[in-house]
């Protein structure tokens, strides 16, 4: 089709005044409904822990015992001393730990991070909220790439071995945001054993999608803490997780795991900022999920809702663009995102065109530090919240926007040559 024909077709979508949102990985209403019984597990007369502790009162700085036991298994650490259970958001824990490191330093370090130049490695495309934390604290971000095995470990090893100001790295290790990739065993092993110029280097291991499979075909992930212990670097990882996309997105429970030294360090700092987390919510969740078997069964119900949405997204992409060589995209086995790579120089225009036709996408550039995609190519697709029918219409609009943006770029290039 010519550019004029594509634009004419595009106008037929614009007049519909659609309002379709594929910008963030929000659970659908149907997914949230799966956890409604959670609201009934604590009542006006039944709110105590297993040990009969009154959860309405102060205390429980690092979580109630049954919540720590649950997250011990969830995070795959070996003891409850290796777990701190927090409030509803793992992002809060990440922000808090970075803040404490800046003001007071971490175990193995000689100085607070704020006393020196601090840099973080940011494999990209990645999670925009990780990058926002770095920007908030003035941490310099170093962009590295991905391979099919996960973050480009060759680039990472070279950087951390030569620069003592590199204090951390952000990694979503399973069904990554937005790549959908899971770190291979070799990547985990090399991350745990690599030589770092900074002896207080930390891996921020945001395992947000550890149980978020789309089908029975599941990725597996090597245990990072166990690998680091075997390498003599047990203080290297902070492991984050939550139930935010398992139960209620705004009312889940989060936790961080790691070495006893790291967790004791964090517990000591928590003393100065809180009397304790929401223990009533922890009781709700530990009554709702008696074990990880319950979690896995619950997530199978999530998958039955999510997979058709991913399947429709991929179906339209294959039909509209599969034989055109105009774009590439991931086909993840789990998580919440599809990473879409358009031709260089077109992502911003595609997102803008889609918005004109009523389809909201994640801003182009958001998946890179400082919101600057050097190729203006990557777009994160989040098909979890709209209905399957809405996704079908939205993706036809996105594909049409791709074709228009490419034609426009070709025309602009021909005029300048």
Image (spheres, rainbow, N blue to C red):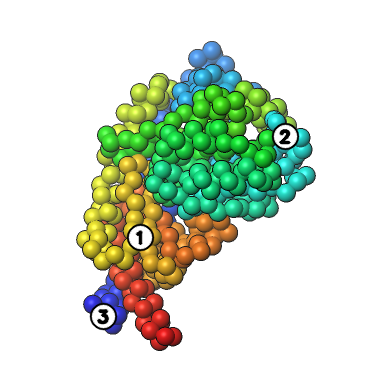
Q: Quadrant of residue 371?
A: bottom right
Mark 1 and mark 3 lie on one chain; the one further toward the N terminus is 3
Q: Nearer the viewer, residue 160 or 339?
A: 160
x%, y% of residue 10? 30, 74
**Point 26% across, 80% down: residue:** 2
Mark 1 vs 3: CB contact within 8 A? no
| Gap in angstroms between the C-alphas marked 1 and 3 | 27 Å
| Gap in angstroms between the C-alphas marked 1 and 2 | 48 Å
**Point 43% across, 60% down: residue:** 378
Location of residue 128 with respect to 102 vertically, above or below: below
Q: How many marks?
A: 3
- In the rendered structure, the answer to whether residue 112 lies left or right of residue 226 reads right
Mark 2 and mark 3 lie on one chain; the one further toward the N terminus is 3
Observer able to see residue 14: no
**Point 55% across, 54% down: residue:** 143
Q: Secondary structure at mark 3?
A: loop
| Mark carried by residue 109 | 2
- In the rendered structure, the answer to whether residue 318 lies left or right of residue 369 reads left
x%, y% of residue 252? 48, 35
Q: Residue furthest top?
A: 51
Q: Secondary structure at mark 1?
A: strand
Residue to which mark 1 is pinned: 20
- In the rendered structure, the answer to whether residue 85 lies left or right of residue 355 reads right
Residue to which mark 3 is pinned: 2
Q: Nearer the viewer, residue 355 or 98?
A: 98
- In the rendered structure, the answer to whether residue 145 lies left or right of residue 215 reads right
């Amino acid at each position: 089709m010519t550019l004029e024909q594509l634009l004419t077709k595009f106008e037929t979508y614009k007049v519909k005044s659609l309002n379709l949102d594929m910008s963030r990985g929000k659970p659908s209403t149907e997914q949230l409904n799966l956890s409604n019984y959670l609201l009934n597990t604590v009542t006006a007369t039944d709110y105590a822990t297993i040990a009969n502790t009154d959860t309405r009162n102060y205390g429980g700085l690092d979580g109630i015992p049954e919540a720590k036991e649950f997250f011990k298994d969830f995070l795959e650490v070996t003891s409850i001393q290796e777990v701190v259970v927090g409030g509803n958001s793992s992002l809060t824990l990440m922000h808090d730990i970075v803040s404490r490191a800046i003001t007071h330093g971490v175990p193995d370090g000689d100085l607070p991070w704020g006393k020196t130049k601090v840099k973080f490695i940011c494999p990209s495309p990645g999670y925009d909220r990780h990058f926002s934390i770095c920007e908030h604290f003035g941490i310099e971000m170093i962009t590295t790439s991905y391979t099919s095995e996960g973050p480009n470990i060759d680039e990472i090893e070279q950087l951390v071995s030569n620069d003592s100001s590199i204090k951390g790295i952000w990694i979503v290790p399973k069904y990554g945001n937005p790549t959908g990739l899971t770190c291979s065993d070799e990547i985990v092993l090399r991350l745990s054993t690599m030589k770092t110029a900074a002896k207080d280097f930390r891996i921020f291991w945001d395992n947000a999608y550890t149980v978020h499979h789309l089908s029975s075909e599941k990725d597996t992930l090597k245990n990072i803490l166990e690998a680091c212990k075997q390498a003599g670097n047990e203080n290297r990882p902070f492991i984050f997780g939550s139930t935010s996309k398992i139960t209620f997105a705004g009312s889940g429970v989060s936790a961080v795991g790691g070495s006893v030294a790291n967790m004791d360090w964090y517990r000591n700092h928590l003393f100065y900022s809180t009397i304790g987390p929401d223990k009533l919510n922890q009781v709700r969740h530990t009554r709702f999920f008696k074990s990880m078997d319950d979690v896995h069964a619950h997530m199978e119900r999530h998958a039955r809702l999510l997979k058709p949405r991913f399947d429709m997204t991929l179906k339209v992409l294959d039909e509209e663009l599969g034989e055109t060589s105009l774009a590439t995209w991931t086909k993840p086995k789990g998580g919440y995102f599809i990473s879409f790579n358009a031709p260089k120089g077109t992502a911003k225009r595609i997102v803008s065109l889609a918005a004109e036709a009523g389809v909201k996408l994640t801003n182009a550039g958001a998946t890179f530090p400082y919101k600057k995609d050097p190729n203006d190519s990557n777009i994160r697709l989040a098909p979890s919240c709209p209905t399957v029918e809405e996704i079908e219409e939205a993706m036809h609009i996105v594909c049409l926007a791709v074709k228009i943006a490419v034609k426009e770029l070709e025309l602009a290039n021909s005029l300048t040559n």
